[in-house]
């Protein structure tokens, strides 16, 4: 394997040096590019072997290197045009950043690891596991569901301890100067203590809310004696087989400190929701977990993502607990333990189901935290100089951190064509033949490369869309953290919101402004192309570039046009048989989906008409358990929705549940560990470059129309959208203050100490 890889890359290097230094005509360069792209198409269609993969990466890298050489030597404006040279260097810098990130990404993802399933170990060989569920302001039903699922994991009960770490009921909060807040904290503490007692979990709180999530978990470390600490976010409920799929790695590898698993979500992120892609397109985070973390795992550089992960307690104690210098305690903790010589493993099997922010504003606020936290680590702890890290680990961490500079090149690429179209500033010197031979072939091979490597988990142009949607707001956050790397603070993202009406996000207006600028640019480019002699060819190239940006901006308008979302509880598709028990009758049913708030059942036998016609018909759903349920095995239901035509499926709401009944819900919802893999496989269909581009263009045409229609739906004095995250920039703008005001109690800062911690990366 190593020999094949080395041969491919050495051959590419020799070819690159030989060809780049030769005076080859533009026609010859075009012929070479077409030949290489033809080979890439053949490999894309027929070649998936290790040699084919290495050859594909090598040939694509050659086209990239050739393009960079041409840009550096032939395309910059002359010094006699200082304005053009300045903006040309800005554009070139953005391109060089992207090329560097691409090269690092190729190195990281050259050979992703796919680990084999573990064999089951005897109970007496298994370590003691302490499960941490940190909570701050989550609803009790969410905590009950997660705790019951954790307690229901397939593991010896005497070796499993579940701890609810309540930062919403600390002494500090119970003694708040505001009497209402103090009383709410006391009630929360009492209620959660009773919940834990009835479930069989342990309740822990602390004196002060210091160092947020990291401080909360460090406080808990003083109370546990187990070998392994397993962390779940409050809304991350584990499937029954979680520990059987993961914990034995710690037996096999004594220097192992971390086993991380993917984060999978039951609800769409705001962009998926607004573009209606959740059921048919891979989520944005899937590429990170199914490819990037596996690629990092090859180099012993996969890192802690804050939840759905096991850590060796002795290693944590050696490092002084969970790190708390930056607001990304998860990655920072892994960074420190890697530097101490410990190892990590990534298990690519979805074993938890969580929730994502519902609104675009909360989504942006979440990404601001991730961005600022990763850049804090880069500035304050500099991976390149960190002692103890292997060179490839340093590269892996630098890849994860420098990635977050993407807002600057993305915005540069979006706005650069306007400099020439509107102000006649030439930032790129080229004729049409050169643009086709170098630029067009570079872009084609780049898109093909992404599609070849990530096509099953990332549709074409989706990465660019997410970067643009975030970049509008992240750029200021980046400047803020670079100027004062200790300033960012942690904020909790509320989830489980409902959106009752279609409306524009509070953050939509910058996207309308950019869209109008690009639309103006396209119209001016078309006008100048027709009426101005001598500039037609160059204007055509720049006009096409601007038109693509206009399509991107159009899709983004759809992404910030919030569709209503009346369902508070996202559902998971399952297939479990059971019975509906009425007062004097039992009916066989199949449960087809389930959520924390209800389920849908398909009748397997006829139901009495009088029960169907009655309002608020009540029953109990009894299931055959997957796990070791004791006591109650049924859930109280209220029928809320009758079947559609030709369908025997009824929508049901769970009636008031007792604490013990959450074990039944956990078995029903999280007992089948193959439910999530089936869901992910159903939408991981490879999308070709042509099909993906066609879909993207269609969105770019229709989504602006929907966005404009939402403008007219907005009424003065209407209810503002729910906001589940803090504003994404410093509190110096009026719109930020409005966002914070709307967030109210659903979004609070956890103040305390020198540093505050965020939620898990690519999750929470």
Image (cartoon, rainbow, N blue to C red):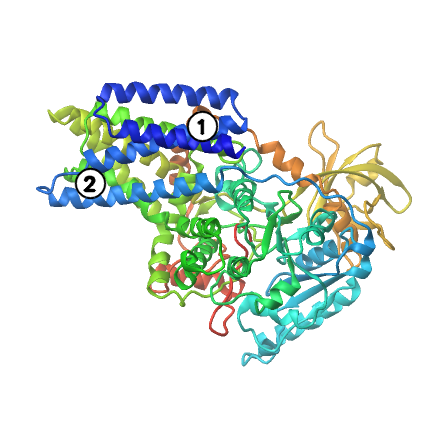
Q: Is residue 688 above or below residue 668?
A: above
Q: Disc number at residue 419?
A: 2
Side of 84 relative to 100 (left or right):
left
Mark 2 or mark 1: which is in front?
A: 1
How many residues crowd around disc 1 within 10 Å: few (fewer than 14), some, or many (20 or more)?
Answer: many
Residue 384 in picture, x, y percent from top left: 41, 56
Nearer to us in this view, 204 or 260? 260
Residue underneath mark 1: 56
Name, please, the residue furthest toward the left: 80
Residue 146 in picture, x, y percent from top left: 69, 56
Q: Is residue 96 above or below residue 729?
A: above
Q: Is residue 678 visible?
A: yes
* Residue at the image position 70 percent from the left and 51 percent from the top: 252
Say which quarter of the image contains residue 695.
Answer: top left
Q: Is residue 558 visible?
A: no
* Residue at the image position 46 percent from the left and 25 percent from the top: 691
Q: Is residue 748 above or below residue 107?
A: below
* Residue at the image position 16 percent from the left and 43 percent from the top: 85
Helix, strand or loop status at disc 2: helix
How many residues crowd around disc 2 within 10 Å: few (fewer than 14), some, or many (20 or more)?
Answer: some
Residue 659 in picture, x, y percent from top left: 77, 60
How many numbered callouts? 2
Label whose residue precedes the other's in the sequence (2 or 1): 1
Name, please, the residue furthest toward the front: 3
């Amino acid at each position: 394997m190593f020999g094949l890889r080395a041969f491919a890359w050495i051959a590419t290097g020799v070819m690159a040096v030989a060809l780049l230094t030769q005076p080859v005509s533009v026609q010859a360069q075009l012929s070479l590019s077409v030949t290489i792209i033809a080979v890439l198409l053949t490999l894309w269609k027929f070649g998936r072997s290790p040699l084919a993969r290495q050859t594909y990466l090598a040939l694509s890298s050659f086209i990239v290197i050739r393009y960079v050489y041409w840009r550096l030597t032939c395309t910059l404006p002359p010094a006699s045009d200082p304005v053009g040279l300045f903006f040309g260097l800005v554009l070139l810098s953005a391109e060089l950043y992207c090329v560097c990130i691409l090269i690092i990404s190729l190195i990281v993802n050259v050979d992703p690891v796919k680990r084999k399933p573990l064999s089951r170990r005897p109970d007496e060989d298994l370590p003691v596991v302490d499960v941490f569920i940190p909570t701050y302001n989550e609803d009790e039903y969410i905590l009950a569901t997660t705790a019951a699922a954790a307690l229901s994991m397939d593991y010896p009960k005497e070796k499993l301890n579940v701890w609810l770490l309540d930062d919403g009921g600390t002494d500090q909060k119970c003694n708040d100067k505001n009497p209402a807040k103090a009383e709410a904290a006391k009630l929360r503490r009492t209620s959660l203590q009773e919940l834990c007692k009835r479930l069989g979990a342990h309740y822990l709180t602390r004196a002060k809310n210091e160092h947020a999530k990291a401080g909360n978990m460090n406080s808990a470390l003083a109370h546990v004696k187990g070998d392994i600490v397993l962390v779940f976010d409050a809304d991350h409920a584990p499937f029954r087989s979680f520990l059987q799929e993961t914990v034995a790695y710690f037996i096999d590898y004594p220097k192992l400190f971390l086993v991380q698993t993917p984060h999978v979500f039951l609800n769409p992120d705001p962009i998926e929701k607004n573009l209606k892609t959740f059921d048919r397109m891979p989520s944005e985070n899937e590429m990170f977990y199914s490819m990037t973390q596996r690629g990092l795992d090859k180099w012993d550089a996969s890192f802690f993502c804050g939840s759905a992960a096991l850590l060796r307690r002795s290693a944590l104690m050696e490092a002084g607990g969970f790190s708390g210098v930056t607001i990304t305690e998860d990655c920072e903790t892994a960074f420190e333990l890697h530097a101490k010589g410990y190892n990590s493993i990534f298990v690519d099997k979805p074993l938890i189901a969580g929730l994502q922010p519902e609104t675009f504003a909360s989504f942006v606020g979440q990404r601001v935290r991730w961005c600022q936290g990763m850049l804090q680590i880069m500035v304050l702890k500099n991976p390149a100089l960190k002692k103890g890290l292997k060179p490839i680990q340093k590269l892996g961490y630098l890849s994860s951190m420098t990635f977050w500079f993407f807002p600057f090149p993305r915005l540069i690429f979006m706005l650069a064509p306007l400099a020439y179209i509107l102000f006649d500033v030439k930032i790129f010197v080229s004729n049409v033949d050169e643009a086709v031979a170098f630029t067009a072939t570079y872009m084609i091979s780049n898109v093909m490369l992404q599609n070849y490597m990530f096509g099953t988990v990332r549709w074409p142009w989706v990465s660019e869309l997410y970067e643009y949607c975030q970049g509008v707001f992240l750029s200021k956050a980046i400047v803020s953290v670079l100027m004062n790397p200790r300033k960012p603070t942690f904020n909790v993202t509320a989830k489980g919101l409902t959106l009752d009406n279609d409306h524009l996000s509070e953050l939509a207006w910058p996207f309308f402004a950019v869209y109008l600028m690009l639309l103006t640019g396209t119209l001016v480019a078309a006008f100048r192309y027709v009426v101005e002699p001598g500039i037609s060819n160059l204007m055509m190239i720049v006009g096409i570039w601007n038109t693509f940006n206009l399509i991107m901006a159009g899709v983004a308008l759809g992404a910030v046009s919030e569709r209503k979302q009346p369902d508070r509880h996202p559902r998971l598709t399952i297939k479990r048989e059971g019975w509906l028990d009425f007062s004097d009758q039992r009916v066989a049913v199949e449960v087809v989906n389930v959520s924390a708030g209800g389920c849908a059942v398909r009748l397997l036998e006829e139901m009495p008409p009088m029960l169907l016609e009655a309002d608020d018909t009540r029953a109990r759903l009894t299931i055959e358990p997957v796990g070791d349920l004791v006591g109650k095995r049924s859930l109280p239901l209220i029928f809320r929705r009758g079947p559609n035509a030709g369908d025997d499926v009824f929508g049901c709401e769970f009636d008031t549940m007792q604490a013990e009944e959450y074990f039944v819900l956990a078995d029903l919802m999280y007992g089948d560990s193959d439910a999530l893999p089936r869901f992910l496989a159903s939408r991981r269909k490879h999308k070709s470059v042509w099909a993906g581009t066609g879909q993207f263009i269609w969105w770019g045409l229709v989504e602006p129309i929907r966005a404009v229609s939402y403008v007219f739906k907005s009424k003065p004095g209407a209810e503002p959208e729910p906001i589940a995250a803090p504003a994404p920039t410093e509190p110096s703008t009026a719109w930020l203050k409005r966002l914070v005001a709307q967030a109210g109690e659903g979004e609070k800062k956890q103040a305390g100490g020198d540093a505050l911690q965020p939620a898990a990366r690519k999750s929470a």
